[in-house]
Image (tube, rainbow, N blue to C red):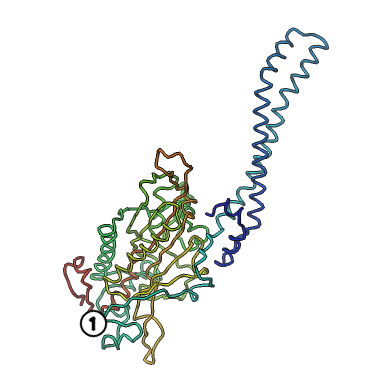
């Protein structure tokens, strides 16, 4: 959620932000509603102050008049009663006016809040302007010494590669037919060494973040209330991507949603809290099962493990002080963690600076990390894929956008501090998502005989084995 004060001071910045992100939000209507609400609040505060003043001043006078009324008779009694009635009526008339203003504010707030939730975070000024993913800019790339992505796989390794679909079939690592039979399209069953490899990469990534980077491992809910989805910025814009569990219809009290990332649970831990500044930054990591409807992806990557409804993801979240330079430094550091993981697994990858049209509502900046997948890309003369990068990670810088929605603050100076509370900043990044990550892992480390070499970093998690197949 954006800062209304910042919008009042510079509404054009938010109009431009909507245009750059290609997200519709009626900024002019929001400004008008905010002015109406603030005007009504100001009048209501003035009337309440007047009401309190009258009550304070008229109290003794009313008591005096009531005493005089007991002794008076005739015209004198009528005059005193009239004066008494007027004194009593003044606060009462103000009470009615206050109630009317309160009703006006109550009528304004639903529309104001609805628009406010739609306003995206303006992109940082150094984010390139573009319409969508095609306008993203490559920042840098990395290849292991034994592979050059500018050449074909066969030129690098001396044989034509299999796709991951062929590898999992031949090595019996997954069963797509039975998965689809049970759960429909984009479903799968990991079998045997496929399941072991999946567990190996997620545990390797978790251990790396906890043991080497000092993150705290957390278990978080994957079935959450709507407030958690709104608070983390996944609703209203991403509502069509989430699975709904309609508990209200079954007497459960409220509906629930399956989360598409562990970020929701990690960020929700401190919702509504005032944190001790001395504890910041908070560094959390989780492994959670994630669910995405893939709405709007009909016909895209329908086969294999790339675009599926259910997967497991190791997610990292940092909650830090409200300082732009600190946020930028954490963004760089979090991407560095992923770079180190991909290097240790010898996966070619590149960093893509997302343009404004590909940021989504909540991000001030986002960098995607794509891994090289020999089984993707355009087809050659023989009908075989020539290889392409595919997204495996995404690192986001959000400043106070989520924390404002979640009402997550800290008081400078700690508990004894006397300053005003400040909304925290937050960042998140995929550490590793599987089974999508198994695609580059299997395809890059396949051998001419059809086996797959297990990278040295994963062997302790695979019983010391060096190969599959």
The quarter of the displayed image where residue 415 is located:
top left
Label 1, secondary structure: give it: loop
Q: Relative to 445, does residue 317 appear above or below in the rendering?
A: above
Position of 361 with respect to 209 (left or right) is right
Looking at the picture, how far across and down is residue 23, in whole percent?
Answer: 57, 64
* Count of numbered circles on the image: 1
The C terminus, quarter of image: bottom left
Q: Relative to 460, does residue 272 appear above or below in the rendering?
A: above
- Residue 360 in sight from this viewpoint: yes
Position of 244 with respect to 183 (left or right) is right
Q: Relative to 239, does residue 423 appear above or below in the rendering?
A: above
Looking at the picture, how far across and down is residue 162, in whole percent?
Answer: 30, 83
Residue designated by label 1: 447
Q: Residue furthest left?
A: 464
Q: Residue furthest right?
A: 75
Q: Nearer the viewer, residue 232 or 414?
A: 414
Position of 456 with respect to 278 (left or right) is left
Looking at the picture, how far across and down is residue 60, in whole percent?
Answer: 67, 17
- How packed mark 1 is, by other alpha carbons closer than 10 Å (few <14, some 14-19, many 20 or more), is some
Q: Nearer the viewer, residue 169 or 435?
A: 435
- Residue shown at 67%/52% (left/top)? 32
The quarter of the displayed image where residue 57 is located:
top right
Q: Residue furthest bottom?
A: 381
- Residue 249 in sight from this viewpoint: no
Looking at the picture, how far across and down is residue 160, in whole percent?
Answer: 29, 87
Q: Residue furthest top?
A: 71
């Amino acid at each position: 959620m954006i800062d209304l004060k910042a919008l009042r001071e510079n509404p054009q910045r938010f109009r431009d932000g909507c245009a750059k992100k290609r997200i519709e939000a009626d900024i002019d209507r929001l400004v008008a509603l905010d002015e109406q609400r603030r005007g009504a609040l100001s009048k209501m505060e003035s009337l309440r102050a007047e009401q309190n003043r009258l009550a304070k001043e008229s109290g003794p006078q009313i008591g005096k008049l009531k005493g005089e009324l007991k002794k008076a008779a005739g015209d004198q009694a009528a005059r005193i009663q009239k004066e008494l009635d007027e004194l009593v009526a003044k606060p009462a008339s103000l009470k009615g006016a206050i109630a009317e203003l309160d009703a006006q504010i109550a009528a304004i707030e639903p529309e104001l809040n609805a628009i406010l939730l739609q306003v995206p975070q303006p992109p940082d000024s150094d984010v390139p302007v573009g319409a969508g993913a095609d306008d993203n800019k490559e920042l840098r790339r990395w290849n292991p010494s034994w592979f050059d992505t500018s050449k074909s796989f066969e030129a690098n390794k001396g044989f034509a590669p299999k796709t991951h679909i062929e590898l999992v079939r031949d090595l019996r690592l997954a069963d797509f037919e039975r998965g689809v039979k049970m759960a429909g399209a984009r479903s799968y069953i990991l079998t045997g060494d496929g399941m072991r490899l999946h567990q190996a990469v997620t545990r390797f990534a978790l251990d790396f973040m906890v043991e080497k980077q000092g993150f705290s491992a957390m278990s978080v809910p994957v079935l959450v209330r709507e407030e958690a989805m709104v608070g983390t910025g996944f609703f209203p814009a991403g509502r069509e991507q989430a699975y709904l569990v309609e508990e209200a219809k079954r007497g459960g009290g409220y509906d629930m949603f399956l989360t598409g990332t562990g970020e929701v649970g990690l960020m929700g831990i401190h919702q509504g809290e005032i944190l001790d500044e001395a504890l910041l930054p908070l560094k959390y990591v989780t492994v959670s099962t994630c669910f995405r409807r893939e709405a709007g992806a009909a016909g895209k990557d329908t086969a294999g493990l790339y675009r599926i409804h259910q997967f497991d993801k190791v997610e990292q979240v940092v909650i830090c002080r409200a300082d732009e330079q600190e946020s930028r430094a954490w963004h760089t550091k979090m991407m560095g963690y992923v770079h180190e993981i991909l290097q240790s697994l010898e996966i070619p990858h590149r960093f893509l600076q997302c343009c404004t049209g590909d940021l989504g509502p909540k991000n001030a900046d986002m960098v995607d990390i794509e891994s090289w997948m020999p089984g993707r890309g355009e087809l050659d003369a023989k009908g075989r894929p020539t290889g392409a990068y595919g997204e495996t990670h995404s690192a986001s810088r959000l400043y106070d956008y989520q924390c404002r929605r979640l009402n997550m603050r800290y008081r400078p100076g700690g508990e004894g501090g006397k300053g005003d509370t400040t909304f925290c900043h937050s960042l998140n990044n995929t550490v590793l998502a599987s089974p999508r990550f198994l695609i580059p892992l299997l395809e890059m480390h396949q051998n001419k005989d059809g086996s797959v070499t297990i990278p040295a970093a994963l062997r302790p998690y695979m019983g010391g084995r060096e190969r599959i197949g």
